[in-house]
Image (cartoon, grey):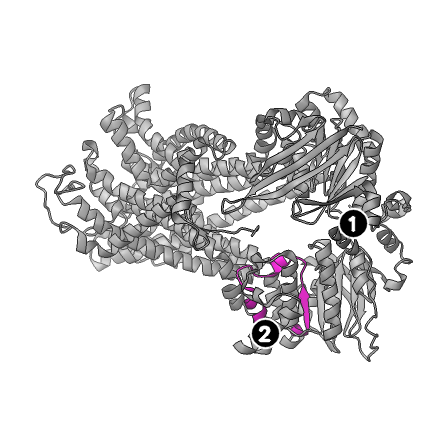
Amino acid sequence: MNNRVLSLVLSRLLIALITLVIVSFAVFFATTLLPGDTATILLGQAATPEAVEGLRKAMHLDDPAIFRFLRWIVGLLQGDLGTSYANEMPVADLIGGRFINTLQLAGVTALFSVPIALTLGITAAMLRGSLYDRAVTVLTIGVISVPEFMIATSAVLIFAVYLKWLPALSFANEVTSLTELLRIYAMPVITLTFVISAQMIRMTRAAVIETLNTPYVEMALLKGASRPRIVFRHALPNALGPIVNAVALSLSYLLGGVIIVETIFNYPGIAKLMVDAVATRDLPLIQSCAMIFCLGYLLLITAADIIAILSNPRLR
Amino acid sequence: MVNLVEIRDLKVEATTDSGRRVEIINGVSFDIAEGEIVALIGESGSGKTTIALTLMGHARPGCRISGGSVSVAGKDMVTLSEKQRARVRGTEVTYVPQSAAAAFNPATTIMDQVIEVTRIHGIMSSDEARARAVDLFRALSLPEPETIGRRYPHQVSGGQLQRLSAAMALIGDPKLVIFDEPTTALDVTTQIEVLRAFKSVMKKGGIAGVYVSHDLAVVAQIADRIVVLKGGETKEIGTTEEILNGAKHPYTRELLAAFEPKPRGAAGAAESGPAPLLEIENLIAGYGQVQADGLPLVRAVEHVSLKVEKGRNLGIIGESGCGKSTLARTIAGILPAAVGKIVFDGKELGRSARERSRDELREMQIVFQYADTALNPAKSVEDILARPLTFYHGMNAKARSARIDELLDMVRLPRNLRHRRPGELSGGQKQRVNFARALAADPKLILCDEITSALDTVVAAAVIDLLKELQRELGLSYIFISHDLSVVESICDEIVVMYGGRKVEEISPAKIKTPEHPYSQLLFSSVPRLDPTWLDGLEQDPELVRAYRQR
Amino acid sequence: MTMTNSETKADRISGTRLGYRFNIIGMVGLSVILFWALIAIFAPLIIPYPVGEIVDLDYFGPMSRDFWLGSDYLGRDMLSRILMGARYTVGISLAAVTIACFSGVMLGMFAAVAGGWLDTVLSRFLDALNSIPSKLFGLVVVAAVGSSIPVLILTLSVIYIPGAYRFARALAVNINAMDFITVARIRGESTLYLIRSEILPNIVGPVLADLGIRFVFIVLLLSGLSFLGLGVQPPYADWGALVRENIGGLPFGAPAVMAPSFAIASLTISVNLLIDNLPKKIRDRSE
């Protein structure tokens, strides 16, 4: 029995690994094989053909693509992320501190949104069809139907422009006090919390409703169980897997949200770094950032799948 | 004598998709005395489960008790508040569901769920409850009564779960237990044990019961009185004796008639022609990875050989998992055989349908159990029947239309049904369309895979009659796969009994009373009869039962 | 309370003439979608001012009788720019969703019917593609090839093919397991017939609803990319680009910032409302 769980988990991990290889392949080829000659871009349109040729040699640009891919992968595995085209600094140095910043933002958001979303999702499912449930449903549909920047701009408009509680822009390197810190994080966190909570609420609600519709919940009702007992003893234990799964999946939406939020609030995180890198076509930097994002995303969805496997009581 | 239950003029309403309200129970009244078991019998849609659930004051989502009274031990379940109802549920009235496998919470142990009632209502301490549960497990002749409660629901068999759910219902010392088709999903050999266990526990405790079922023979074994329902109305109420021997209402008589064994009748004089229509030799088939010896990992059919003569019918009978359906799929080429020869009408067929010619495919048709999934819900009856006509016979629109009329006539369906979609037909009508599609190919052999199992008894009997008639007219042969001995008996000239993927015996209906193989003996003797003394008088060799009762 | 009231009223209004029930929320959704579709088609005929012309002396002007939605950061009429923006937002998204769903659904049905290694390889590959976050995918492609409308359409559709594939494949696998497919197979039917005549008619409803949801995703992603400056490039501007252009007006609460966002929200919310409240065919089993 436990062997089955182990083999399911292992096969899921294997799939994640294969996916990672395919993804890195896609990222690498999308950024290097598509039109636009790197050497020309780096040296500018005015460069002499000889200079371009020299640079191509130096950067191994004339090697077959597969070698360059392998060299890149080996480099990644050794922690060598390459050198930025734009300012010739090692990519690893550029990313380091900013990666921490982004993780902090994501962490704080998760800390807020997970409890809020679970409470709203579970209660809405319990009170299905009530006015409260309808309000939650309408609100979540509203939030997931609008772009992240609209939530961000609305938040600025409300909290910074009209109420003047918070500053519109944040600079994490100028933090001097705790209150300052709170004020600076507030806006990005509020925005991101809205974005991912909506998803989480919807998925949690659906998961709980599904278990509430099962024959064993009806059986509990026919045993004379009270409503709280039905929900907490019979529905929730079985919805736990799907709920945790929903949380992991919703957290993966953070990645999309963070790109917009960091840009709009000027937050010095890795997503902002990447958007800037796109503007300067700094390929090594883009590749590394893209790989970090994909890795994070893959980790979350793999975790979600593994949780779903582990929480299936029939596999115990 | 004071009645424990008095139902008076009960009405239940359901809300349809369009928001319209319809009465699904129109004024049902009956009583149950203390310690009496009353059966509610009827076909699907007769409202039997709905009525049973009102005894607990419960109506499924979308339904509502709209009138009348349901008095249980002096309390009217209709007018009680939800809280008061909860107090009655599990203590005075309890419920044994149709599918115990779905009604057990997969996340907690069996013991926790069995004694949950005592916890909810604070009846006794946990230790007492546990001891009582073990006693009940023993009384219900469950294996390993001391430890079975520690397992999770997916770790025990269906027949055991059904008995465990009875333990769950009995632990609160109820006055009334509702059994909702508790043995319908079980094989006959398992059904016997479960029925016996239920009966002895109920009689010993003097507990009253409501037994919901569509099967008169099962009900005859356990019920004191029978309520016959149809379309949400009572058709007849009487003691089991009265209903079985002196039914007054025509509908009851129809139900009983469907039970009468109708022997095959003038068997199409065995045209002992030179070659049989179908001959199968040493067939092996299964699922999973192919092993080094060229055989599949899980072998569902092992070394089966059989023969079907022209114009004669072969029945294949066995319990779930015996490989009978796999055999049909192998013959049809859906699941290619790993080993073996299939000779049809003198030619050896390819093992996979893909390797067979269009004519070979045309001459052997298969009809599946569930017409719901066998008919494309997006197409009209006309389109469904037209396709084989175009595909095999290349008919033009006019010829097709005429032939569709003929086919509908053949299966006794009104011609104007051709524009309907399967979703707008009844179960019996769908199965007729399903069959008409096979006829459209002009086949020589039709494989019928449990085609009557999903139908109500009366409807199934009519379909069988139709099949016999068509055989006389068209000179077809059938391979009839079923778990239901009486069905096979009534239409087949030769019966093959399967167990564990093997053919254990081949027997003619005439000798069905005296099978030779011990498994056939066990299987045939387990089929309930319309005789209230059958279960009590039945003696089966316990060794035999242990040897062949899987799961 | 009010909800139930409006619903019963909606029943009365829409009636049940055709055996379909369509409630008022769904109808509102549909009308807003039709409104934007008409705007997208006829925008050049109805805009009050030329889109590129500076017509207001003030920049970030407030709403007024002359400029219903105020003016932008250069003093151009915001209403005209939004009406014209509808062409890009609706047009690009529609093109992308059509390509994405068509290819995804075709591949999905094919994989489900064919099965075997072909199904495995296709599913694995598209799943891998799906595990690149969509915005990131957009960023990478734009970084590599630059942004133009055809590139945008193609990128957006490639991003959403895996989703459409997965959805259609799951539906088709369920249908494929039905006995009527087995019956058709052993009749000797071709794969093409199975896909076209047996599977497609059974999944077309959910697939259309999925198309609507994917349309919403694409509108949001396109707007997001344009907001980052990686989508529709000047002189053209879709709704996302309009927000980007005018983000400087945010501290003043200028209508130019929020108006395009509201346009996006009105479109996407309407599509969601329509999908949740599609006309239901009334099935009354009890005659």
Residue C277 image position (x, y, % from top left): 42, 46
In the image, what residue type sits under mark 1? Lys
In the image, what residue type sits under mark 2? Leu
**Most extreme residue toward the bottom, as rendered?**
B274
Q: Is residue B271 left or right of residue B50?
A: right
Q: In this view, does A213 lie to the left or right of B49?
A: left
Q: In this view, does C12 lie above or below C157?
A: above
Image disc number at residue B248: 1
- Would residue C188 be seen by someone viewing this image from the given angle? yes
Residue shown at 68% from the left, 66% from the top:
B366
User: Mark 2, residues whose alpha carbon is within 10 Å: few (<14), some, or many (≥20)?
Assistant: many
Residue shown at 83% from the left, 36% from the top:
B141
Residue C166 image position (x, y, % from top left): 48, 53
Secondary element type, mark 1 = loop
Residue B275 image position (x, y, % from top left): 80, 78
Q: Quadrant of residue A80?
A: top left
Q: In this view, does B364 lie to the left or right of C36?
A: right
Q: Is residue C222 above or below residue A242?
A: below
**Most extreme residue toward the left, as rendered?**
C57
- Would residue C133 be seen by someone viewing this image from the given angle? no
Specify the subunit that label 1 lies on. Answer: B
Taking depth in this image into account, of A273 and C131 the one nearest to the observer is C131
Which span of residues is magenta-colored?
B361-386
Residue B474 image position (x, y, % from top left): 72, 75
Specify the subunit that label 2 lies on. Answer: B
Residue shown at 75% from the left, 24% from the top:
B129
Taking depth in this image into account, of A22 and A162 the one nearest to the observer is A162
Q: Distance between the residues labelled 1 and 2?
A: 47 Å
Secondary element type, mark 2 = helix
Residue hosting label 2 = B389
- The quadrant of the image that shows the C terminus of chain A is top right
The stretch drawn in magenta includes residue A177: no
